[in-house]
Amino acid sequence: MKLAILCGGYGTRIRDVADNMPKPMIPIGAKPILWHIMKYYAEYGVKQFVLCLGYKGDVIKDFFLNYEANTNDFTITLGRDKKIQYHNEHPESDWQVTLAETGLNAMTGARVKRVQKYLAGEENFMLTYGDGVGDVDIDRLIDYHRSHGRILTVTGVRPPGRFGELMNDPSGKVVEFNEKPQASGGRISGGFFVCRREIFDYLDDAEGLVFERRPMRDLVRDGQMMVYEHDGFWQPMDTNREYVLLNELYEKGEAPWVKW
């Protein structure tokens, strides 16, 4: 099954971290968050990717065009008939990555519609955002999607708390403090979608089409959207604080999404 990744947004809320690169290229450790997302899916056998490019898409293209040289030892023969001989293989050697320009200002629905040709022939495909990680069980998610037969499955997550949570006894004494609690209320969409090919009947090429608005509302109206409930780890990288959090987890060896 192929995975389409939305990589075209401006990332205006995290410009203080990196103003010269698209948000999917902001690093966790030495690699972009986009690579972490792809690596996670690849652990479940999903190794065909369609990247929906927009803002600074050339940075993402350069990363993959130079991937072999940046991850392998190689010998280059200079001159008119120059040749490059790579001396080792990296674990991503069987990835197939399609980099598709979907428009600088296109919204998410238009971006998905514009890569339809690269998903032709797929009865189902996966879709996610290029700026968030989680430990969603992809095998169970796919099984759930296939079991209900509806057009769209969205992974419902509990939003991570952005402030410290205090718990106190009747006297006012603090008895528990959670620095980054998980909200206990309703769920939000965490991405990690699975779509039937009929999803394209709900999309069009209008630049302003937001996937999460009219298309999803129409799917709900038609009884064609189901939620896969995920109570594990999920975290977007929308702010500097979240950038720091994800990098701290990775550096400490406590990143729940790292399964390689």
Image (cartoon, grey):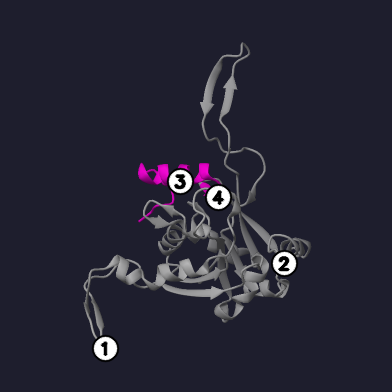
Mark carried by residue 208: 2
Q: Position of residue 29 (x, y in %)?
A: 38, 51
The quarter holding residue 79 reads bottom left
Q: What is the spatial separation of the Cα atoms under label 4 and label 2, in whole angstroms?
A: 22 Å
Q: Is residue 254 magenta?
A: yes
Q: Which residue is the extreme one toward the right?
A: 221
Residue 118 in magenta stretch: no
Front-lying residue, 9 or 249: 9
Residue that badge 4 annotates? 14
Q: What element carries label 2?
A: loop
Disc nearer the start of the sequence (4/1): 4
* Chain part drawn in magenta: 234-260
Image position of 213 with respect to 67: above or below: above
C-alpha span from label 2 to label 3: 31 Å
- The residue lying at 62 percent from left, 70 percent from top is 112
Label 2 CA crowd tier, 10 Å (few <14, some 14–19, many 20+): some
Q: Which of marks 1 and 3 is nearer the N terminus?
A: 1
Quadrant of the rendered structure where residue 95 is? Answer: bottom left
Marked residue nearer the N-terminal end (4 or 3): 4
- Give the residue type at disc 3: Leu
Is residue 150 in view? no
> Residue sitting at 58 percent across and 33 percent down?
163
